[in-house]
Image (cartoon, rainbow, N blue to C red):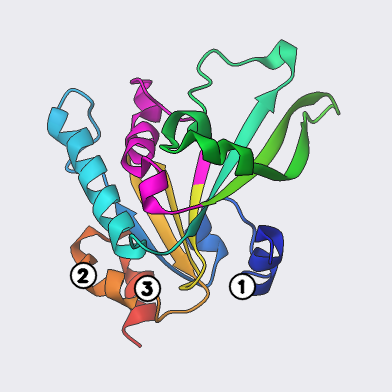
């Protein structure tokens, strides 16, 4: 089964784009950066990395393969950005031989309102084990993106656990979404990391998991 078939079977009619928490029936939104968003405090980004890594390790084990999907935006020449960030796969794959298995499974053209083409989005995927990937480096680079602290990643990165049907998406230093097609897969996260749930969405999340 390819990744598009997998998403269609388990997440039908759910846009594969942020915010996943609002697009998929079961999800938890976690707060990463506390107590305030300031790069001047070294503890801030340390907390972002610590929380995102602990949540990642809870979802993905050392022995089962999972998918990493990168949504990469390529601008046409006249719209080239100055802060494009680094490429995920060449930078963070520990086993560089796996680059031969990186595959673009979908491409979308992006247009301005006047019909002018401004860029192309490539959806690129790879199936890996944790030992194949410097995932902590990816999470750190995502947390750095809004501050332009190198290394930083501007592409969207999704991790998919196909046995539990869990999608993990860290959107930036503020937080991450963990979603699934079933509530049971997320209940351990809800219990173990309850104090990290984003207060803005806590009431809705608790309604789902305390039924």
Instruction: Look at the image and say whether residue 138 sits in the magenta stretch.
Output: yes
- Name of the residue lying farthest toward the bottom: 211
**Which quarter shows the C terminus?**
bottom left
Q: Which mark is residue 19?
A: none
Residue on which disc 1 sits: 10
Q: From the top left corner, tell me how far across and down residue 95 is, in percent.
A: 45, 38
Label pair 2/3, CB-CB below 8 angstroms: no
Figure quadrant of residue 124: top right
Q: Is residue 121 above or below residue 61?
A: above
The 10 Å Cα crowd at callout 2, few under 14, some 14 to 19, many 20 or more, is few
Nearest the eye: 196 or 122: 122
Instruction: Look at the image and say whether residue 77 sits in the magenta stretch.
Output: no
Q: From mark 1 to mark 3, how far is it between C-alphas?
A: 15 Å
Residue on which disc 3 sits: 186
The 10 Å Cα crowd at callout 1, few under 14, some 14 to 19, many 20 or more, is some
- Name of the residue lying farthest toward the front: 97
Q: Is residue 40 left or right of residue 186?
A: left
Q: Secondary structure at mark 2?
A: helix
Image point (31%, 41%), residue name: 136
Q: Is residue 203 above or below residue 55?
A: below
**Which quarter shows the N terminus?**
bottom right
Q: Earlier in the sequence, mark 1 or mark 3?
A: 1
Figure quadrant of residue 34: top left
Image point (61%, 73%), residue name: 10
Magenta segment range?
128-157
Q: From the top left corner, tell me how far across and down residue 130 is, in percent.
A: 38, 52
Q: From mark 2 to mark 3, how far is it between C-alphas?
A: 10 Å
Label pair 1/3, CB-CB below 8 angstroms: no
Q: Secondary structure at mark 3?
A: loop
What is the total number of numbered labels drawn onto the structure image? 3
Nearest the eye: 101 or 164: 101
């Amino acid at each position: 089964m390819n990744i598009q078939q997998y998403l269609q079977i388990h997440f039908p009619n759910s846009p594969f784009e942020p915010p996943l928490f609002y697009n998929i029936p079961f999800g938890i939104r976690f707060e990463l950066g506390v107590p305030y968003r300031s790069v001047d405090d070294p503890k801030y980004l340390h907390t972002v990395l610590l929380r995102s890594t602990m949540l990642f390790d809870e979802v993905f084990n050392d022995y089962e393969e999972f998918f990493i999907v990168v949504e990469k935006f390529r601008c046409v020449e006249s719209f080239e950005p100055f802060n494009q960030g680094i490429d995920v796969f060449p930078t963070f794959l520990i086993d560089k031989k796996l680059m031969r298995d990186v595959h673009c499974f979908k491409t979308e053209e992006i247009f301005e309102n006047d019909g002018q083409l401004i860029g192309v989005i490539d959806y690129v995927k790879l199936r890996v084990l944790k030992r194949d990937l410097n995932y902590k480096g990816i999470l750190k680079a995502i947390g750095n993106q809004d501050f332009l602290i190198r290394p930083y990643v501007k592409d969207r990165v999704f991790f998919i656990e196909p046995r539990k049907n869990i999608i993990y998406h860290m959107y930036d230093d503020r937080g991450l979404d963990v979603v699934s097609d079933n509530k049971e897969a997320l209940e351990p996260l809800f219990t173990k990391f309850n104090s990290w749930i984003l207060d803005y969405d806590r009431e809705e999340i608790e309604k789902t998991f305390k039924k």
